[in-house]
Image (tube, grey):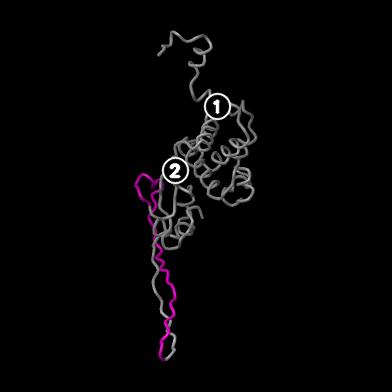
């Protein structure tokens, strides 16, 4: 084992540079930049690094679940999953247009690049396994919000950054059974319950201005829904 006194001049100079700075100065490839811009555009203006890390992880998880090998193909074929790519989002556009030199000088953009690299490398997942997220509109449009109308459950008080209530929407699924009498040949129709659930989304985390979600186990068990859609 060696100590700092045994480092040659090049090693010593490298050791003096903070890890975040050396990471930021790596060339940014196209896939990393696209993912970073999406996370940057979807995140709140707080530039919360955990929020962008979580969003980037969800995007990569969704990409993988849908069978795409890269972010460009994902965004081309599933345009409605992240609207920032095509709706003129200023933060998304700013990072996509930024040169590496600009990104190096902007703390928020650096955080987005780091978030993208972390997600693509399979690093820590700040979303805790989420497949979906919502921003402030879940509070401002609570009564008409799609997820609220489907049913949501805040599973931990720390996730409730907007102080919203849980919502329930009981659904009972049935299957139809035909019973034929052997003597009379009369057919009787009987409904049998398959299962029930009262909400679709469970919160998994919250960072910055974003709440993260996954489908509830009850919903998946009853409907046999895929985790990602």
Expressed as whole percent of the image width and height from the top left, the position of residue 76 reads 64, 48
Which contiguous range is marked in magenta? 154-183
Q: Considering the image in quadrants, where does the N terminus appear?
A: top left
Label 2 SS: loop
Expressed as whole percent of the image width and height from the top left, the position of residue 73 reads 63, 45
Q: Please, is residue 53 above or below residue 137 in the view?
A: above
Expressed as whole percent of the image width and height from the top left, the position of residue 199 reads 40, 59
- Badge 1 crowding class, 10 Å Cα cut-off, few under 14, some 14 to 19, many 20 or more, is many
The answer to whether 41 appears left or right of 174 in the picture is right
- Residue nearest the viewer, comparing 53 with 45: 53
Check if residue 165 falls in the magenta segment.
yes
Give the labeled residue for mark 1.
24
Tell me which residue sits at (53%, 36%) in the image. 116
Check if residue 220 falls in the magenta segment.
no
Tell me which residue sits at (53%, 23%) in the image. 22
Expressed as whole percent of the image width and height from the top left, the position of residue 35 reads 57, 39
Give the labeled residue for mark 2.
127
Mark linked to residue 95? none
């Amino acid at each position: 084992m060696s100590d700092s006194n045994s480092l040659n001049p090049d090693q010593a100079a490298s050791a003096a540079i903070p890890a975040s700075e050396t990471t930021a100065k790596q060339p940014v490839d196209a896939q990393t930049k696209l993912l970073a811009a999406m996370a940057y555009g979807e995140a709140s203006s707080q530039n919360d690094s955990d929020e962008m890390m979580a969003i980037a992880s969800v995007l990569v998880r969704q990409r993988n679940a849908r069978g795409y090998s890269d972010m460009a193909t994902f965004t081309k074929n599933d345009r409605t999953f992240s609207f920032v790519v095509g709706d003129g989002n200023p933060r998304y556009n700013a990072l996509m247009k930024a040169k590496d030199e600009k990104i190096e000088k902007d703390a928020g953009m650096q955080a987005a690049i780091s978030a993208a690299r972390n997600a693509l490398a399979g690093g820590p997942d700040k979303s805790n396994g989420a497949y979906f997220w919502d921003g402030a509109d879940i509070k401002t449009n609570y009564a008409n919000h799609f997820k609220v109308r489907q049913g949501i459950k805040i599973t931990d008080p720390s996730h409730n950054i907007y102080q919203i209530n849980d919502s329930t929407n009981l659904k009972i699924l049935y299957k139809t059974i035909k019973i034929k009498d052997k003597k009379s040949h009369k057919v009787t129709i009987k409904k049998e319950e398959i299962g029930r659930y009262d909400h679709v989304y469970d919160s998994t985390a919250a960072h910055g201005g974003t709440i993260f979600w996954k489908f509830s186990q009850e919903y998946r068990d009853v409907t046999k829904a895929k985790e990602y859609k």
